[in-house]
Amino acid sequence: EGFDILDTDGSGRIDAGDLLVALRALGFEPRKDEVKKLMSDNDKENTGTINKQQFVEIFRAKWGETDPPDLLRLAFQLYDTEESGDLTLENLRDVTEMIGETVSMEELQDMINEAAGIKPGDEGVDTITEEQFMKIMVQQKEKEGTI
């Protein structure tokens, strides 16, 4: 989603300036020379641009350099667009897609309900807090064996 916002001409590619903006928006503070290196490492065609897949790979590499709780807190804040202190099911779907996870809406609703302490069969909840979000993301990573 972040990539698509930066790809203003719809070409499927962004340049170094766009990458710098994206990384800063995601809470990273890259130096211009670091962005230049990221571009040269990923721009195999020497076009001065990268595609969406290359952007995702850069993001995943940067994600790995960051303390997971800090990054999860940042992700929560990034997707809490109304600054309400809560995330909706749709917000959570966007977060999981951004970090490269494939989770159905039903699974996400189940995770939200579990994090909120809702028992199976009871009426579900529509939003979750930052603490509940952190719990969901940690559970998902443990399920995959990546923590």
Image: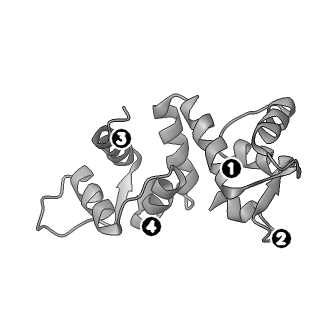
**Which numbered disc, 1 or 3, marks the residue that appears first in the sequence?**
1
Label 2 crowd bin: few (<14), some (14–19), many (20+), radius 10 Å = few
Residue contact at pointers 2 and 4, CB within 8 angstroms: no
How far apart are the alpha carbons under marks 2 and 4? 26 Å
Q: Which of 87 and 42 is in front in this view?
A: 42
Amino acid of disc 4: Glu
Quadrant that contains the N terminus? bottom right
How far apart are the alpha carbons under marks 4 and 3? 19 Å
Q: What element carries label 2?
A: loop
Q: Is any atom of residue 84 visible in this view?
A: no
Label drawn at residue 55:
1
Amino acid of disc 3: Lys
Q: Which residue is drawn at 38% across and 42% down?
A: 134
Residue assigned mark 3: 141
- Residue 70 point in image, percent of width and height: 51, 33
**Which numbered disc, 2 or 4, marks the residue that appears first in the sequence?**
2
**Which numbered disc, 3 or 2, marks the residue that appears first in the sequence?**
2
Residue assigned mark 2: 9
Viewer-nearest of discs 1 and 3: 1
In the image, taking residue 55 as reference, residue 100 lies left or right, namely left
Residue contact at pointers 3 and 2, CB within 8 angstroms: no
When asked about the image quadrant of residue 44, the answer is: top right
Label 3 crowd bin: few (<14), some (14–19), many (20+), radius 10 Å = few
Looking at the picture, does residue 125 appear above or below residue 142? below
**Which numbered disc, 1 or 4, marks the residue that appears first in the sequence?**
1
Viewer-nearest of discs 4 and 3: 3
Looking at the picture, does residue 76 appear above or below residue 69? below
How far apart are the alpha carbons under marks 1 and 3? 22 Å
How far apart are the alpha carbons under marks 1 and 4? 22 Å
Residue assigned mark 4: 90
In the image, taking residue 97 as reference, residue 106 lies left or right, namely left
